[in-house]
Image (cartoon, grey):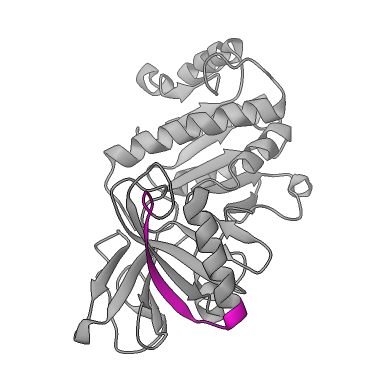
Amino acid sequence: MTGDWFSSADGVLVTVAASKGSVPREPGAKMLVRANDFDGTIGGGHLEHRALELARAMLQAGEARRFERFALGPSLGQCCGGVAWLAFERAAAGQMDVLRARRNVDTWRLIALDGAHDWALFDAAGARLAGMQDTHVVTNDQTTRVIEGEGGRRWLVDPILAPRAHLMLFGAGHVGAAIVRALSELPCHVTWVDERDDLFPQQVPANVTVEATDTPETLIENAAPGTTFLVMTHSHALDLRLCHAILLRPAGDWFGLIGSSTKRSQFEARLRERGVLDTRIADMVCPIGLPGIAGKAPAIIAASCAAQLLSVWEAQSKEQPEYH
């Protein structure tokens, strides 16, 4: 199992359509079930086991859709005790192709839960992208929900939101590569930057975009507000250039620099020489990673840094309004 339910259209897509009380996963959680494996998760346990059974029975029977209610306590023996409604649908190749292409852009799904097996996709402005004609959704509501249409017909409105967290990672060395691996299934988008094109692997995770450039400062200048930056190149001189470019941006972006306390002191002095104010230098996080984790192996640094970034991003998500 992997976390990427976009990976194949040959299966049954299971979505948590609604919930009441305590349940393992929130509405919108998904898994794509195939005959012998699956991607994604709706929380594990007996609920997921039962959903896998039903989805595979649909595959065998050629069934297009189901909408089922599960009482987790009485019927499944899970201690959560809430109620989950699951939508099962044969994954339409045309729909999945569009979603894969738009994984970094917000998309809304409208799925019929009864009647004909109808579906449509919409962009953030409500314009139809694919599927049935003469339909619309309200895109200012970013919650997965079940609505009732004409004649009592039920529909699943399912926002597929692009990751809000964007990391610009400078350096394709051992630590940079380990961080990319650590973030590969996390809800973020990574722009991975280095001038040495031959260092990048031939295949990178779906949430990663490679930028091989000898003018990385341009990427920094054009990055959207709220971008997260990590600097760990092969050159201290290049690191200093990048730090300077990042600190010239308006305050508010989280910025980490790999290195020791000694490196931080040296960079602080050089940044002051370049006219950077102490208030901005204080925004530079160096060393990076969680306190108390001293290991210097790339995988250890990556695990510590990934946890640090998740903490930063969760705090940002509580402070900032949603955006498209």
Q: In which quarter of the image is residue 165?
A: top left
Q: Position of residue 116 (x, y in %)?
A: 39, 88
Is residue 69 covered in magenta? yes
Q: Position of residue 245 (x, y in %)?
A: 49, 35
Assign the C terminus to one quadrant of the image: bottom left
Residue 125 vertical placement versus 249 (above, below):
below
Number of marks in picture: 0
Residue 59 vertical placement versus 171 (above, below):
below
Quick one: 70 or 152, which is closer to the camera?
A: 70
- Residue at the far front: name it: 74
Residue 101 at least partly seen: no
Q: Position of residue 33 (x, y in %)?
A: 58, 65
Residues drawn in magenta: 60-74
Residue 265 vertical placement versus 248 (above, below):
above
Residue 235 vertical placement versus 267 (above, below):
below
Is residue 315 covered in magenta? no
Q: Which residue is drawn at 35% across and 34% down?
A: 315
Quick one: 43 or 51, which is closer to the camera?
A: 51
Q: Residue at x 35, y 75 (%)?
A: 110
Assign the N terminus to one quadrant of the image: bottom right
Q: Residue at x 50, y 62 (%)?
A: 51
Q: Quadrant of residue 101?
A: bottom right
Q: Is residue 218 left or right of residue 118?
A: right
Q: Where is residue 60 in the image (x, y as percent from the top left)?
A: 62, 78
Residue 271 at least partly seen: yes
